[in-house]
Amino acid sequence: MRFIAALLVFAFHATGRSNYITGSLGEVLRKVFANAGFYGVTFFFVLSGFLLTWSARPNDTAPRVWRRRVVKIFPNHLVTFAMAAVLMLITAQPFVHLDTFAGLFLVQAWVPDMTVPTAMNPVSWSLSCELFFYLCFPALLWALNRVPKRALWAVAGSLAALTVLAPVAAQHLIGGVPLPSIVDGPLSFEQIWFVYFFPPVRALEFVLGMVTARLMREGGWPRLPLLLALLIAVGGYVFNSNVPYLYGTGGTAALWLTPLVAAAADTDRHGTASPFRRMALVRLGELSFAFYLVHGLAITYADTWFIASGHPSPGARAGILLAVFAVSLLLANLLFTLVESPVVRRFSTPRLRGPGLIPVTPASQKALAVKE
């Protein structure tokens, strides 16, 4: 499902402020996909918490967890950060020290300044949140494992309530200069930043995914048909597209997406039918992280070079957009094959030293179990 979520983010950026599809069709698609990026990001945050908790290793250590996650996100980030820098140089865009260094070290989501969170490679702000989640994960997992089974639903309900209360708090407790571009009322960037960018607030979705994994492991999560979970997710998208802006942008999407994550995992666990296990989707899911990091740059600079600088026909614009998608997929494949996959294989676990030491792999674990 990861690639589908990444595709939602692609659709959001391709139909938002870009000029690929114009006229009445462009207006319709802009409205249809106005919340697609927000929905896709929330899906990734919930899924991340769920998967890390579901696959947590017994007796694992915090440094090992951090090593695996840093090795996973930073190589792709550094390559796409460099790509963004080169593209900025080619287009003669100025570099701002705060923007550049905040983006490089993935702390940009902590800065409530309009230019900082989306500077350089704009989509990497979500990695700033993910990095915070990963740093907190060992402590969060330790705490979650000590919550009694009977209290898990109370914790899940509290997290769900907090995702709804975050926009309320932003509206009534945070000030700032109102932005003119918000259609359903005056909102400041600081209010939007608190709901959408601020890592501790976005951590609510990550922790909700963690609690859901624990509920499933304890047998406390009801079995939900995958089709019903999909309908809930689609209905939730329609609902979120028709609520005030702050409620549609933030973590309230987790209310509708968490059942989908759990239902899909349940089909895998029980071997029941699921369209998401098809080999093509599995492969695209492997590419989704790299695709997510490159697509925004491809959309932005193709728009600058091939559309904004000329007056192509609607058909040519659509063709350019298809080419942008194909290029994004090609770059994602190269990034995954040449950077992400080999670096993860090489550095995600420490190399064992000394004679006679054999790395523990799933195959060797199985062999040891047979011998025992």
Image (cartoon, grey):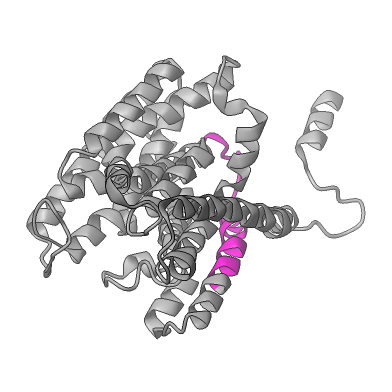
30 lies left or right of 52: left
175 lies left or right of 3: left
Q: Give the camera-side residue of 47 and 222.
A: 47
Residue at image location 41% in from the left, 69% down from the top: 107
> With respect to residue 236, does 326 lie above or below?
below
Residue 312: quarter of image: bottom left
Quadrant that contains the C terminus = top right
Residue 155 seen in the current view: no
Q: Position of residue 283 (x, y in %)?
A: 65, 39
Residue at image location 24% in from the left, 54% down from the top: 195
Residue 259: quarter of image: top left
Residue at image location 48% in from the left, 54% down from the top: 316
Examine the structure image and report whether residue 181 is included in the region drawn in magenta: no
Q: Position of residue 42 (x, y in %)?
A: 37, 44
Examine the structure image and report whether residue 68 is included in the region drawn in magenta: yes
Q: Tell me the chief SS of the magenta region.
A: helix
Q: Position of residue 241 (x, y in %)?
A: 24, 39
Residue 215 seen in the current view: yes
Q: Position of residue 41 (x, y in %)?
A: 40, 47
> With respect to residue 110, does 57 lie above or below?
above
Highlighted range, magenta:
54-81
